[in-house]
Image (tube, rainbow, N blue to C red):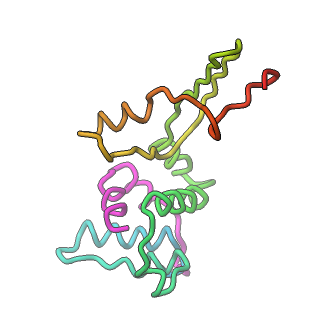
Amino acid sequence: MNSLLQTLYHIPYFRKAVYHMPTTENDMPSGSIPLALQSLFYKLQYSDTSVATKELTKSFGWDTYDSFMQHDVQELNRVLSEKLEDKMKGTVVEGTIQQLFEGHHMNYIECINVDYKSTRKESFYDLQLDVKGCRDVYASFDKYVEVESLEGDNKYHAEQHG
């Protein structure tokens, strides 16, 4: 979680959007994700000591036990992004998550034995790159976009062709 928070903090446009998320004077950091994140970012920006994430994890609804459990950073990012997107709706920073993190890729399917092709544009907020056996991130990207044969249990049902 710390690496994710530090990464997000170091994206100036994201940090600015977090600071511009509206909060009220009645909000408590432990009950408000925007206020807890604003507080955390402020401390990261101006403190010379390490910064605790307790208020933020409480704002997620986590108890002490949940805070010490290992969480998948990709899933945590997805949950945090969804919650922030929801809190940003109707504010001056609405659409920030989408502008910063949404990408698109084309999914192509071409059948070998029948005349069928399909192209579909899909959006994503993160990519799950396989790094095992790859010498660098470029090799991981190459592996991500390589042609894959859909056979056996992984077969594709082509419309009207079976």
* Outermost residue to the right: 160
Query: In the rendered image, which quarter contains the C terminus?
Result: top right
Q: In the image, residue 89 lies at what x, y percent? A: 61, 54
Indicate left or right for 104 with 139 as reference: right
Up the image or down, 3 lies above or below 138; here it is below
Query: Which corner quadrant of the image does residue 160 belong to?
Result: top right
Query: In the rendered image, which quarter contains the N terminus?
Result: bottom left
Q: In the image, residue 28 lies at what x, y percent? A: 51, 82
* Outermost residue to the bottom: 64
Q: In the image, residue 64 lies at what x, y percent? A: 45, 87
Q: In the image, residue 4 lies at what x, y percent? A: 36, 61
Query: Which corner quadrant of the image does residue 87 belong to?
Result: bottom right
* Outermost residue to the left: 48
Up the image or down, 96 lies above or below 64; here it is above
Give yes or no for residue 73 being in the magenta stretch. Answer: no
Residue pictured at 50% horizontal, 85% vertical: 63
Up the image or down, 80 lies above or below 129; here it is below
Q: Which of 160 and 51 is in front in this view?
A: 160
Residue pictured at 55% horizontal, 81% vertical: 26
Q: Nearer the viewer, residue 115 or 27?
A: 115
Q: How many labels does the image show?
A: 0
Indicate left or right for 7 with 100 as reference: left
Indicate left or right for 118 with 37 as reference: right
* Outermost residue to the front: 152
Give yes or no for residue 16 being in the magenta stretch. Answer: yes
**Residue segment shown in magenta:** 1-27
Q: Nearer the viewer, residue 127 or 28?
A: 127
Query: Which corner quadrant of the image does residue 71 belong to?
Result: bottom left
